[in-house]
Each structure stands twice: as C-alpha cells, then as structure tokens.
Image (cartoon, rainbow, N blue to C red):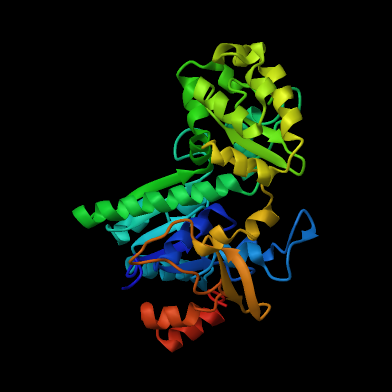
Amino acid sequence: MGNALEGIRVVDLTVWFQGPVAAQHLADFGAEVIKVERPNGGDQGRGVRSIKALPVADWNQYFLVINRNKKSIAIDLKKESGREILYRLVEKSDVFLSNMGIELLEGWNLGYDKLSEINPKLVYATNTGYGRFGAVNKPSFDMTVQALTGLMARLGEPGQPPIYLGMGSGDAFGGLMSALAIMMALHHRRRTGKGQWVDASLYGAQLYLTGQTLQAYLAGDRDRAKQRSRRDVVNPLWNVYQASDRWLFVCAHNNETGWKKVCGAMGASELANDARFANADLRRSNGPELVDALDAVFAQGASDDWVKKLRAKNVPSSPVCNLADLAADPQAWENDYFVKAHCEEVQREVDVRGLPIGLRKTPGSVRTLGPELAQDTELTLNMLLDYSWEEIAELKEAGVIP
C-alpha cells in the first residue's frame, strides 16, 4: 500500500526547527514536501555545524534530519516574479506552511487572504511564537518561551536556579502540534471542500506540555506553582532515589499495599515496622525522614537490581538513563524510534531519530536525509509548474532562482 499522505503536496516555507519538523512529520508519511528557501544560503539551519561552538558531528545532523524526505527549491521572494512562482505552486498544493512572522508574510503578499484567494482549498498553516492574537511580535525561542510558561520555574530544587528542559523540546512539540492541526484541517477539507488557516505556537505547545501540573494549579492547588525538594514530596514512594550506580525512579502509591510492596522489594523489615511510617498520613508528614531512610537503603544496590526486585512486586520503576543508554536500547530500534539512513555528505549510514508513531498498513519511513539547496528547483518549475526552459533561463538570469 502507498504511504498514508501520498497525494498531499506541502509548500514548506520554514526555517530553523519548529516549522521544519512539522513538515518533516508530513514528509515521513508520504506527503510531497517542497521546501522553499532563499537562494543565498537557504534555511539558516544549513549553517548549524556545532552547538555552543562545539562540533557535533562530521555531518550537518541539525538540518539534514529535520528536513528529511523533502525537495528543495530556491526562490527570491522579494522579487515579484519569485512570488509568482510561489503563487503557481500554491495553486497546485494542499498545504502552505510557514514559521515566518505573519507581518513578513503579509509584506511579501503571502498572507492568508492572498493565498486562499488563489486556492480556496488551501490549508494555510503558521507556526508562531505566541499565537495569532495579542502581543504576537515578541522574539520567540524555545528557551525563552519555556521560561515564560512556568515550566522552568517548577523544575529543580528550591533555592536553586530553574532548570531548562532543553533538547529543543518546545520546538519539537510545537512542530508535532502543527502537523496535528494540518491533518485536522485536511480532514475538514475532505468533508467540506474548504481550506482554512491553522496556527500552532511555541507558547501554546509548551503550556500544553505542563499538563496536569498547570491544570491542578488552575483548579486551585497553589502548591503546584512551586519548586519542590525531592525530600519534601507529597508521596515519598513516588520519587527519585540514588542507587549505587545511578538514579532510580520509583512509582508506588502511598497506601498500605504500595508501602508493603516497596518494603518487601527492598527487604526493609525495619522500615516496614517503623512507627514513624505506620500509615499514609505519617509517611506524608514524616516525608523527609522517610526519603532519607529510603536513600540509605537504595544506595546499597545497583539500579538494575532494584528495578528487578521492585518490578517483581509490581512496583513500576526505572533507572534514570542518559542518552548513551537510550541510543543502545534495542526497544527504541525495534520500534523504529531510531533508524539508520544513508548520508550523502559523509557517504555512510548514520543513526537518526526515527518516527514517533507507527501505522501498520501505511507506515512512514526515512527515505532520504535533507536535500541540497535548490536541487529540485528547475525540475519543479518545468514539470510541475509548466515553466519552459527558456523562462527558467530568464529567471536564472534575473537572479530569481539560482
């Protein structure tokens, strides 16, 4: 069977991370994604060869992975004839996706009103920093928006600096939300024949990432807003502990059943009989002392051994893994969360992030890594947009395309 999104064409006018990763999800499942770049340098992500001036790899993993399975055309959109190319492309496409500023798009005459007039069935998708309404023109970066949403303020120990979740998590989640919005709009179009404007923002995505914690605060639990020490948690049996080799997370309910399971797995009969921890209320009120006591026991064994003992008692637990542990986990490879792909830049297979979801009948795949700048420009103009080779030569002469 074909890919799930076969037949869907996406005009991808995005840069950096949030927008490109939204288009990447669509491309992974078979959409024809045509990435539109500026002739001089293209997407700024093409220049990311290091992080904080430290080399990451001998290939441009930043750009090539989040722009995989795409085509690349380069157009100078500041020129009227360049915008005319985009108009003809929009006319033959299903989705227009951009994370450029809305004012910039309007200035280039690429706003929703103009493009929906050209193609009323078009799904016009924007990735913004803060949404379409209110104060929308503030600079937005993953870390600054994460600081704004309360997520950082909730992490870390009291009195210590807030913790940045890192890893571009807001951008990544915002891109996924954008792909979801596009799919819903395409479904609506299938029923009605009408396109619409959809938006996913860094702010909205990261607010959603705060999940239950934010909702509990909105419902009246003001303690949820505070950093909380691991020695002063509501449930000491649902906590992180230091084993002899690494940290370990234990998830048990603070009831008699949960307490007996944890003590049984730890072989801690003295704790089980300690009057300070005789019931749930006492374990909560004497939480710091209980955490100290559990620390002392867990420190005597390795995390993997504790996990086996805890799971034998049906207590969910896991070691706190690092990225090296994750990269070697066969579970991730067997489910295509990691895959190998050929990299033209270094002429070998490289390890890349795979697909976060699986479809049994129409699975996605990583077919190619990110394209070379403008590699598909001339063929797209000739074969899809019906430009003659003479017209293409004139566009090149005028500097509209490289």
Tell me if I can see residue 42 in this picture. Answer: no
Residue 395 image position (x, y, % from top left): 50, 79
Which of the 4 quarters of the picture holds residue 91?
bottom left
Residue 129 vs residue 401, the one in the foreground: 129
Image quadrant containing the C terminus = bottom right
Q: How many marks?
A: 0
Residue 109 lies left or right of residue 345; in this view the side is: left
Which of the 4 quarters of the picture holds residue 160?
top right
Q: Is residue 305 above or below residue 25?
A: above
Q: Is residue 366 above or below residue 389?
A: above
Residue 294 image position (x, y, % from top left): 70, 27
Residue 183 image position (x, y, % from top left): 35, 54
Q: Residue extending furthest bottom? A: 390
Tell me if I can see residue 363 in this picture. Answer: yes
Residue 266 lies left or right of residue 370; in this view the side is: right
Image quadrant containing the N terminus = bottom left
Q: Residue extending furthest right? A: 53
Residue 93 image position (x, y, % from top left): 35, 66
Residue 324 vs residue 211, the one in the foreground: 324
Image point (31%, 51%), residue name: 185
Image point (52%, 20%), residue name: 256
Image point (37%, 53%), residue name: 182
Q: Is residue 162 above or below residue 343?
A: above
Image point (74%, 40%), residue name: 301
